[in-house]
Amino acid sequence: MSQLLHAIEEAKTIGISGHRRPDGDCVGACLGLYNYIKDVYPEKDVTVYLESIKEEYKFLRYSDTVNHSFTDQKELDLFVVLDCADIDRLGDYGVYLKKAKKVFCVDHHISNPGFGDFCIVEPEASSTCEILFEQFDYDKISKSCAEAIYMGIVHDTGVFKHTNTTRKTMHIAGDLIAKGLNTSHIIDDTFYRKSYAQNQILGRALIESIQLLDGKILFSIITKNMLKFYGVSGADLDGIIDQLRMTEGVECAILIYEIGLHKYKVSLRSNDYVNVSQIASGFGGGGHIRAAGCTMMGLPRDVINNLTLPIAKQMKDAGLIEASEI
Ligand code: 5GP
Ligand code: MN
């Protein structure tokens, strides 16, 4: 039996949580584990604690039971933290972590220092969902559980195209498909479908993108006024950073969007050389080698300048640019 199932068997009350602004992997992991526990251990008292989740993820079974407040303040026997690189990224749900008798962390962020009583961090795994799958007993995975896990893998691999997609990832995806999933529905409806307003802001971000270092860096800035104008939120910006990254000649893409006065959420992506996790960690964030993020203060010009300096240094070390270009 896996370490996680052993911890679950020993607990009566279980909480499951993940990072703030939960993405597809985070929601898939939390609801995948919830479904598994509900199916296999119906006697357990289990709750998922997460910030609000996107409409497109709500086809997942039990998504309507997610607790979005942190009012019950339960003292849990076991608190499972999924896809969350550090305690700060749990936001308000950190209260459960402090009170829980046991904390079990499952994650794949290279920047995760490891926390909790049990901790499985596998940076080479495509997603937290991939690691979770291996903790489960395959024969006991229901179709509903498989849908959640598959969705998480699809999202963190950009539909099996990012460099984190391995032979193992594809084997696991195949095993999940064998549970009878409607994969094109999951891929189109949760990953590719965009609203009209989302497409408009994507277009605006691309039109206003700016090249640096001969186009090796491409950045775009989204202000609060722009979000208001198109009637969208930060959650509607998915996909923009990947389109910037895929532009010909780009090694590193930067998207910053305003979340407060002189406060910006930063998304970083790279193709082959730049370790963006290292860049983001330098500003208090983290993530993966080719996809990372952080929050920064200042004017947009300062934020971009502060980010491009260490990126340019890495590019020089990789031989992409001359020292004189920094
Ligand atoms: P995104 O650009 O899609 O928001 O995030 C890319 C990756 O970086 C994700 O794996 C995400 O968890 C991580 N990430 C984004 N923002 C932060 C942050 O502020 N702190 C940490 N530790 N990781 C972040
Ligand atoms: Mn993830």
Image (spheres, rainbow, N blue to C red):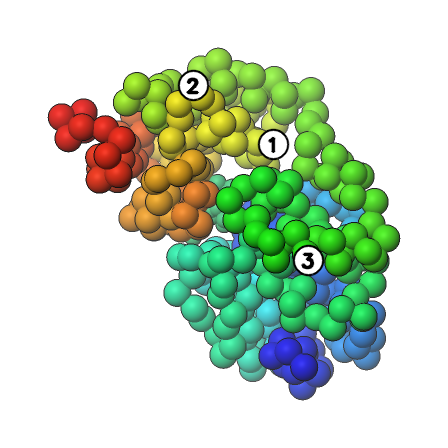
In the rendering, at what x and y percent does residue 302 appear?
Answer: 27, 30
Three-letter code, disc 1:
Asp
* Left or right for 221, reference 148: left
In the rendering, at what x and y percent does residue 52 appear?
Answer: 65, 48
**In terms of depth relative to the viewer, which is nearer, 10 or 227?**
10
* Label 3 near ligand 2 (CB < 8 Å): no
**SS class of the residue under badge 1?**
helix
Q: CA distance from mark 1 to mark 3?
A: 29 Å
Give the label, 1 or 3, closer to the camera: 3
**Of callouts 3 and 2, the N-terminal one:** 3
Q: Work out which residue is located at the far right of the displayed protein and give it.
A: 180
Q: Does 292 sit above or below residue 139?
A: above
Q: Residue at x 79, y 77 (%)?
A: 41
Label count reads: 3
Return the residue at label 1.
Answer: 236
Q: Does 246 sit above or below residue 101?
A: above
Return the residue at label 3.
Answer: 172
| Quadrant of res 215 | top left
In the rendering, at what x and y percent does residue 151 appear?
Answer: 70, 48
* Left or right for 134, reference 226: right
Q: Residue at x 52, y 62 (%)?
A: 107
Q: Residue at x 76, y 36 (%)?
A: 189
Of the 4 image quadrants, the one containing the N terminus is bottom right
| Quadrant of res 103 | bottom right
Q: CA distance from mark 3 to mark 2?
A: 37 Å
**Residue 209 marker:** 2
Q: Does 213 sit above or below residue 82?
A: above
